[in-house]
Image (spheres, rainbow, N blue to C red):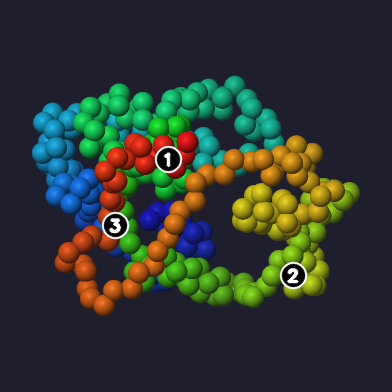
């Protein structure tokens, strides 16, 4: 939750005045079959007991895995995630390249997990999270193992009212600071200054407005092909190159309404593995 809290701290506000975040006692239930289930806790002692119940003496390798990934996370956070790279030399310099080599980004996630963990169930418990971002666990760089490490080391939290409560909190915060928010505003084009090669305005609902700064968070291929005219495309991002980009896997979502309280029967988060997980993954990504 510190990432959320930082937004409010930057505005010299207390996040607790805007929304309520609660840490969950368990991250999720994992179902390997109808009768084979493990409940993954955030408490260290309970986690150890869970691991040992699956396979005796598995805790040491599991903790070694978390230590390895945590060290890489600290390097990534300090030297990459929290830094701004405004020019090529900010990234391509001996110090940054040396730190990048410590991340061992050419390793595969499944190879790293198997290095420390022998049990197949525990391996799956640490591998499936790359699916959050649409990547095959067997092909993803080992750095993406940061995801399960963060879940286990920092815990999983729930925002009361769901994620949209955070959106409402940001809206309230910005309005208090004098920000004017426009809704139902169809952005048709990002206006580019042809001389200085920078964004200078937006065409919204048929009208052009100039702005000092523009931040675009739309999907890159869409923004480049639909919001920026071809003559202003960066040379290395031709229309053909954008059309040929590889996309990560999407997700199929179902919103199901039920007429009773299920909190006594299931956790907030549940992961259900198919009977043949490896073949299922191959069918999706191969």
161 to the left or right of 12:
left
Q: Are marks 2 and 3 in contact (CB under 8 Å)?
A: no
User: Crowding near pointer 2: few (<14 within 10 Å), some, many (20+)?
Assistant: some
Query: What is the number of the mark on residue 42?
Result: none
User: Crowding near pointer 1: few (<14 within 10 Å), some, many (20+)?
Assistant: few
Distance in Å between CA atoms under marks 1 and 3:
25 Å
Which mark is first along the chain, 3 or 1? 3
| Residue with the mark numbered 3 | 269
In this rendering, is residue 67 above or below 134?
above
| Residue with the mark numbered 2 | 204
Q: Nearer the viewer, mark 1 or mark 3?
A: 1
Residue located 17% across and 64% down the image: 265
Q: What x and y, as percent, mark residue 208? A: 81, 69
Q: Are marks 2 and 1 in contact (CB under 8 Å)?
A: no
Distance in Å between CA atoms under marks 2 and 1:
42 Å
Q: Quadrant of residue 266?
A: bottom left
Q: Quadrant of residue 21?
A: bottom left
* Residue 27 appearing in the image: no
Distance in Å between CA atoms under marks 2 and 3:
39 Å
Q: Secondary structure at mark 2?
A: strand
Q: Which of these two is toward me, 52 or 243?
A: 243
Which mark is first along the chain, 3 or 2? 2
Q: What x and y, as percent, mark residue 44? A: 18, 43
User: Crowding near pointer 3: few (<14 within 10 Å), some, many (20+)?
Assistant: few
228 to the left or right of 130:
right
Q: Quadrant of residue 107?
A: top left
| Residue with the mark numbered 1 | 283
* Residue 10 appearing in the image: yes
Residue located 30% across and 26% down the image: 114
Which mark is first along the chain, 1 or 2? 2
Q: Residue furthest right?
A: 195
Residue located 56% across and 75% down the image: 175
């Amino acid at each position: 939750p510190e990432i959320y809290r930082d937004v409010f701290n930057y505005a010299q506000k207390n996040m607790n005045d805007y929304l309520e975040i609660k840490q969950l006692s368990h991250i999720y239930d994992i179902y390997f079959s109808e009768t084979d289930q493990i409940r993954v806790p955030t408490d260290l002692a309970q986690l150890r007991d869970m691991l040992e119940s699956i396979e005796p003496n598995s805790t040491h390798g599991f903790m070694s895995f978390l230590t390895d990934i945590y060290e890489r996370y600290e390097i990534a956070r300090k030297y990459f995630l929290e830094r701004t790279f405004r020019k090529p030399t900010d990234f391509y310099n001996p110090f940054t390249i040396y730190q990048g080599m410590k991340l061992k980004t050419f390793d595969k996630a499944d190879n790293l997990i198997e290095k420390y963990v022998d049990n197949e169930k525990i391996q799956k418990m640490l591998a499936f999270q790359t699916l959050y971002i649409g990547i095959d666990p067997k092909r993803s760089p080992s750095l993406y193992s940061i995801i399960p490490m963060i879940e286990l080391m920092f815990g999983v939290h729930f925002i009361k009212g769901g994620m949209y409560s955070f959106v409402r909190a940001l809206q309230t915060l910005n309005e208090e600071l004098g920000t004017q928010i426009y809704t139902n505003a169809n952005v048709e084009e990002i206006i580019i200054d042809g001389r200085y090669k920078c964004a200078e305005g937006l065409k919204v609902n048929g009208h052009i407005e100039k702005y000092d700064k523009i931040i675009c968070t739309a999907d890159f291929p869409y923004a480049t092909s639909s919001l920026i005219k071809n003559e202003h495309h960066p040379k290395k991002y031709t229309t053909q190159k954008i059309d040929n980009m590889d996309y990560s896997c999407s997700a199929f979502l179902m919103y199901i309404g039920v007429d009773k309280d299920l909190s006594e029967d299931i956790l907030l988060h549940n992961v259900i593995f198919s009977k043949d997980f490896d073949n299922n993954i191959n069918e999706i990504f191969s």
